[in-house]
Amino acid sequence: MLEHLESSIDIVNDPNAVSSIDELPLWSAPFGMLLLDKVKLKPAITALDIGFGMGFPLIELSQRLGHSSTVYGIDLWKTAIERARLKIKTFHINNVRLVEGDASSTEFEDSFFDLIVSNVGINNFENPRAVLDECYRVAKPGAQLLFTTNPKGHMKEFYQVYEETLSELNMAGLLRELQGHIDHRLTPGIIQEMLEKSGFKVVDSILNHFYLRYASGTAFLNHYFIKIGFLDAWKNLIPEEEREKFFTRLEEKLNFIAKKEGELKLTIPCACIEAVK
């Protein structure tokens, strides 16, 4: 009953503890806070986090629900799973179960979960409709489903400059590829339609936004998260022999905007869609 009195976390001397608390992801936190604000917190429920990555909001959700609930996480990212496992061990968390697997085809029983969440995951699903169909199968009648996403309109200021750079460098033939890249992000309306086709009833949809702000285009393009999350896709749109010329000019144009406006400010739309079975 008083477990909290019997364990402590030493962030001064324990390197595992330090490496475990580094993470609240700046990128995913605004989406996750929307999701957590909408979760119906009840004791003794079974929940699933799809695409939990390094453990957010999986671990936070498990803590808010408490010991009487069990929260499962499913993901294919082996390295991230090990990271989440370290945090669970370090923080003495006993109500989380990790599964390495594909959310479009799971071994969970029918009607198993009271709650299913996914934070900024649906754009990365190889087959979103198959995942939603599987969610419907494993959800109990009346189960709550909450998905967040950065929908179409993401970094619209950047993509405008990218498009202008293509045109300026006589590379307008690549505009179709650019548009296809932009269109891979789903709109809230498309996600709602997919949920309804899978059998869910959409009960709420929230669309907010936040900003990523940089002192220059150079700072933006060299930000670690931009490099690990977006830069490869932007590079792959451009033929290798043209990349240096293209990105040199793109960086110049972004720097010009930052100097003129006092900063480079990029809009990140933030949607949270709630449905029930």
Image: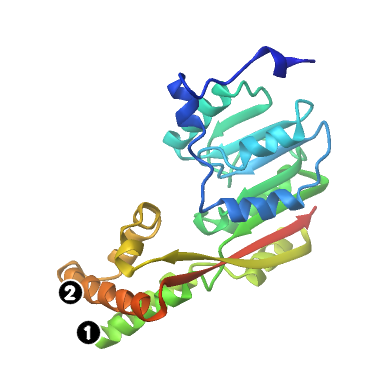
Q: Is residue 255 left or right of residue 146?
A: left
Q: In the rendering, which numbered label is found on residue 13?
A: none
Q: In the rendering, which numbered label is found on residue 245?
A: 2
How many dots with numbers? 2
Residue 161 point in image, percent of width and height: 36, 79
Q: Name the residue under label 1.
A: 169
Amino acid type indicated by mark 1: Leu
Instruction: Tell whether label 1 touches label 2 (CB within 8 Å).
Output: yes
The way the protein has been coloured in the rendering is rainbow
Provide the secondary structure element on which disc 1 rests. Answer: loop
The residue that appears at 75% across and 25% down in the rendered structure is 67
Residue that protrudes farthest toward the top in the picture: 6
| Position above or below: 202 against 104 | below
Quadrant of res 109: top right
Provide the secondary structure element on which disc 2 rests. Answer: helix
The mark that comes first in sequence, 2 or 1, is: 1
Amino acid type indicated by mark 2: Lys
- Answer yes or no: is residue 107 visible: no
Quadrant of res 165: bottom left
Residue 104 point in image, percent of width and height: 58, 47
Which is more toward the observer, 36 or 176? Answer: 36
Residue 251 point in image, percent of width and height: 27, 72
Residue 43 point in image, percent of width and height: 83, 33
| Position above or below: 214 against 127 | below
How packed is label 2: few (under 14 Cα within 10 Å), some, or many (20 or more)?
few
Quadrant of res 73: top right
